[in-house]
Amino acid sequence: MNRSRHPMLPGAQYIEIVNPRIQRGRIKHALFDFDGTISLIREGWQGVMIPMMVDILAEYARPGETREALHELVRDFVTRLTGKQTIYQMIELTEQIKARGGRPKEPLEYKHQYLDLLWKQIHHRVDALKAGRIGPAEMLVPGALDILANLKARGVAMYVASGTDRPYVRDEAAVLGVPAYVGDQIYGALDDYQSWSKAKVIQEIISSHGLEGPELVAFGDGYVEIENAKQVGGLAVGVATNEKERRGIDEWKRGRLIEAGADLIIPDFREQDRVVAYLFGEE
């Protein structure tokens, strides 16, 4: 895990410049992850998925394999696959069951089991937003709408792509006011998981608009969108959000984002004006 700090943008509270050699000033399109990057509605999802998987795997545990060991195993692959469609974490769960001699259910069954458990934890947030009992700001990564507004004013085309199922993403984005900035360019996972991925969305943006790499920037708190953006020569901003506290850096995320190839690391979008100015070559 990368613990050493890279230079900070002078005068900024926290804009860590991991790669100072990027081509700035060419951005035309921007891709945003959703959960943990824009939205906090699903904050705490790991605390639902990981215990569920540990409970399932405990039924097939090898001799001497403790719950603590299973927890570490599950935490590792859940984190590694964060940003990909949820089904991939469930596929890995089935592989772990098979490795212990078990006969798992279909990955889609485990995915639906997880989504039911998660909904029990977060439905009150969505209900409160829709009823107006809480405002969107309480469920947004700080500054998220500000950066969307800033980029829209600069003529940047924007997209949201999430590993969460498409109906949920679109519903939750709507109650947070995101479509006002990105329109209907909101994408999410499908049950037919092989027909969709963030990499495919990025490739479609690149090919349909005839873009060169530095004309695309991706913002995300997961390994996948950062890696996908760098694979096509794009820029990548790692958003190492501390989702629970809503302030400061999550060191685990930061390390993973740097490993994935992030050019910048930020904790949230409180300094979005300076982030955007830097990406446009104005700082």
Image (tube, helix red, strand yellow):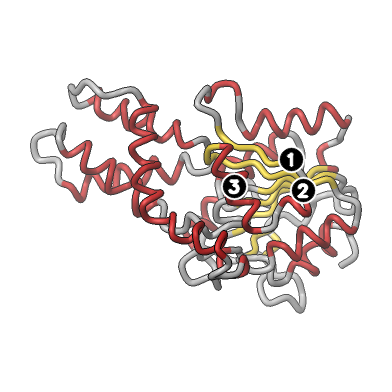
The location of residue 106, given as percent across then percent down, is 33, 22
Task: From the viewer's perspective, tell me whether residue 212 is left or right of residue 7.
Answer: right
Task: From the viewer's perspective, tell me whether residue 47 is left or right of residue 71.
Answer: right
Where is mark 1, residue-wise? 185
Answer yes or no: is residue 259 visible: yes
Circles 2 and 1 in contact, beta carbons < 8 Å: yes
At x 64%, y 44%, the residue is 226
**Disc 2 from disc 3: Cα separation:** 14 Å
Circles 3 and 1 in contact, beta carbons < 8 Å: no
Determine which of the numbered discs, if any, sits on residue 182 in the image. 2
At x 67%, y 28%, the residue is 200
Given residues 240 and 7, the one toward you in this image is 240
Determine which of the numbered discs, if any, sits on residue 171 in the image. 3
- Indicate the quadrant containing the C terminus: top left, top right, bottom left or bottom right: bottom right
Answer yes or no: is residue 258 visible: no
The answer to which quarter of the image holds residue 215 is: top right
Q: Secondary structure at mark 2?
A: helix
Task: From the viewer's perspective, tell me whether residue 271 is left or right of residue 83.
Answer: right
Comparing marks 2 and 3, which lies closer to the viewer?
3
The location of residue 262, given as percent across then percent down, is 65, 51
**Disc 2 from disc 1: Cα separation:** 6 Å
Crowd rating for badge 2 (residues with CA inside 10 Å; few <14, some 14–19, many 20+): many
Q: Amino acid at mark 3?
A: Asp
